[in-house]
Amino acid sequence: MMKIDVAGLGPADISFITKGVFDKLRKHKRPILRTKIHPAAAELEQYGIFAESYDDFYDAATDFDSLYEKIAKNLIERAKTEDVLYCVPGSPLVAEKTVSLLREFANEAKVELTIHPALSFLDLLYERACIDPILGLAIIDAADEEKFSAVKDFSLVLTQVYNQKIASDVKLSLMEHLDDEYEIFYAYHLGLPEEEIRFVKLYELDRIKKFDYLTSLYVKRQ
């Protein structure tokens, strides 16, 4: 039967990969990574794990929606001729659009899909910011500004804060709902040696210099 295994690489370096996933990576002939731009992915070759990635798909993409659909469909096609081990940053069950699409496409194509849970950046953020998600938490892409009004009812975790431009857009959108001096929790490179976490006033948010794909924000409900 056609089969795809989906695994997470954890939120930071290779030490956060579960033993089960690490064993699968070592046994598989050629794992496929969504991207090699991730701390754990960068370390795999040190352990004799040589993977390919979809980074060339990123280079040719015009938007993320079509990119993720292209990746998912390619994985389904590959599963017709080989057992696929597909690995994503963090957890495959948290904010991973390609996995959501794979669920849909695998069902249609009669491909067996097995998802192996992993630690996500949220687990580290919960500890660093003293968050109990059961009290009410919404996880939102920083680009989905129309959803920021949820801060009236829930605390927010904003993901994909890639650069200062996005941070500036987030600041302006949140200012429609919060006081300019409201404190936002800034989290950069959680779990890595250069980790930086601190509270920053909302009006100062885009003055921070360090933003990339491993940056998130926590906005506590008023």
Image (cartoon, rainbow, N blue to C red):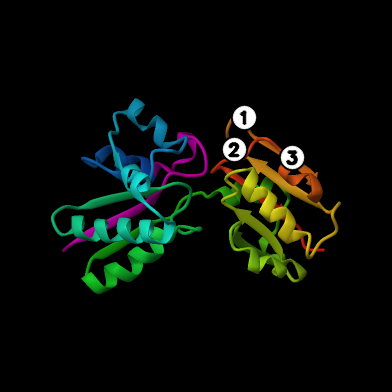
Work out which residue is located at the far bottom of the displayed protein and give it: 108
Q: Which residue is mark 2?
A: 189
Residue at 67% x, 61% y: name it. Answer: 133
The crowd level at tag 2 (other Cα within 10 Å; few <14, some 14-19, many 20+) is: many
Q: Which residue is mark 3?
A: 207
Residue 125: x and y in percent read 64, 48
Tell me whether the residue at label 1 lies in contact with that at label 2, contact meaning CB atoms closer than 8 angstroms.
yes
Q: Does the magenta segment cover residue 64? A: no
Q: Check residue 194 in the rendering and tell me which mark sits there, or answer none.
A: 1
Which residue range is magenta in the image? Answer: 1-19
Q: Nearer the viewer, residue 5 or 201?
A: 201
SS of the residue under disc 2: loop
The amino acid type, in three-letter code, at marker 1 is Glu
For the C terminus, the quadrant is bottom right
Q: Nearer the viewer, residue 182 or 166?
A: 166
Residue at 72% x, 44% y: name it. Answer: 206
Work out which residue is located at the far left of the displayed protein and give it: 81
